[in-house]
Image (cartoon, rainbow, N blue to C red):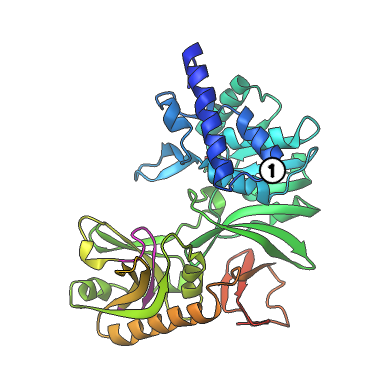
Amino acid sequence: MAGSALDTISADAARARLVDQLIANGRITSPAVERAFRRVPRHLFAPDDLSIDAAYADDVIITKRGADGRATSSISAPWLQAMMLHAARLRPGAHVLEVGSGGYNAALIAEVVGPYGTVTSIDIDSDVTAHARAALDAAGYPHVEVVTADAETGWPAAAPYDAVIVTVEAGDLPPAWLDQLAPDGLLVVPLRMRGNTRCLALTRESDHLIAVDSIVCGFVPMQGTAADPVSRRALRGDEVTLRIDDPDTRALNLDALTTALNGPQIEAWSGVTIPPATSFDSLHLWLAGQPLPYGQLAVDRDRAADLQPQNWVACPALLTDDSISYLSIRRLDDGTWQFGARGYGPQAVALTRHLLDLIADWDRHHRTTPGPHIAIYPSGTFPPATSQPRLVVARRHATTAINWTISGSRA
Ligand SMILES: C[S@@+](CC[C@H](N)C(=O)[O-])C[C@H]1O[C@@H](n2cnc3c(N)ncnc32)[C@H](O)[C@@H]1O
């Protein structure tokens, strides 16, 4: 974005407002990260035609779309960047690899690691790296290295890294990221687990990794050798789409779900309520952790309003090859929210009952706990002798195991 003197004054004011807001919301929690956000001019990394206000909104900025209209590159939302910087536990002098470029986040990292640290930012798309290089130079960060390459093989030239910060959604962990990580380094990665993406901060524990931080997030999907996007099935034209992550479920013949959705709906309500503005993030991951085929519904709010899913973008759904039941929610007179389930198809009753039981189990045992224990086992190290995880996501390079603690034991 070009800058006149007036633009600079309003950018400074807009940036100060954004940082104050990030501190007030608890997203920025350290002086080092605050200083970085106060210094780096986000508008210089944004598209030229974006207003100063939009450049400093606490929101994602899409910078490139693919032929299908979906975003392939973006500047991530400041709240998420702040949380990821904290999760990476960066210190002055650290050596950092950023996977997925754009320039702005690399500049923030450069501010935190200071003059004795190094930042290498790698992106598969030469348009992105050309823009990042130019913007970093214009903003005063010529020392940040920008590389055009597929990050599947990392960037060995500047390894080992104290932190590898991945800013693109991954379905698997390429071995190079771990090989190039220092022994006590941190890998921060938005990992997709049965369609649920959590930005995990991973540290080594003997032969595997454990998550010491987990943030609900969304990122553009990985391209290149490691590309493994969720599959999307249109169930009612483009009004209702089912996103499926599991290789096994992708292979199911789900054509009958369209017929089911055009038939009668049953709805049932659980006894579980939550107060307004209360997070229930762990419920989605809990519902993913059961053996039935599982997907997430994306529903057009205007054209398929009759479905009333709990989440219009990614609503947990239990599946059979002819029936579907998904999470719903409604507001009660006292202002609280009540969870329920809606079902379609010949097995709707059983599926819906099962979904209500899962909601009740989550309420009884897990809604107030800090969330599940997530461990990642590089190829050849799974299964561990000691645990039987509730959810296992096996990929080519790594297997993710998710356990839930109940009163000192794991479910
Ligand atoms: C969300 S953007 C990065 C945001 C950026 N870090 C920022 O400053 O906010 C994700 C980027 O990952 C890149 N990407 C996707 N697959 C990749 C791969 N295999 N290797 C390297 N970069 C990849 C995309 O081209 C895209 O520019």
Which x, y percent locates residue 161?
Answer: 76, 46
- Specify whether residue 311 is painted magenta: yes
The quadrant in which the C terminus is found is bottom right
- Specify whether residue 366 is painted magenta: no
Residue that numbered label 1 is attached to = 30
Q: Main secondary structure of the magenta part?
A: loop
Furthest residue toward top: 5
Label 1 amino acid? Ser
Give the left or right position of residue 64, taking residue 297 as reference.
right
Give the left or right position of residue 307, taking residue 371 as reference.
left
Considering depth in this image, is 8 or 3 the residue closer to the camera? Answer: 8
Residue shown at the point (76%, 32%) measured from the top left: 114
Q: Is residue 239 above or below residue 165?
A: below
Residue shown at the point (55%, 28%) measured from the top left: 130
Label count reads: 1
Which x, y percent locates residue 287?
Answer: 46, 74
Which x, y percent locates residue 298?
Answer: 33, 60
Considering depth in this image, is 268 or 44 the residue closer to the camera? Answer: 268
Residue shown at the point (55%, 55%) measured from the top left: 170
Which x, y percent locates residue 68?
Answer: 34, 45
Considering depth in this image, is 33 or 65 the residue closer to the camera? Answer: 33
The span shown in magenta is 309-323
Quarter of the rendering containing residue 251: bottom left
Q: Is residue 14 above or below residue 249?
A: above
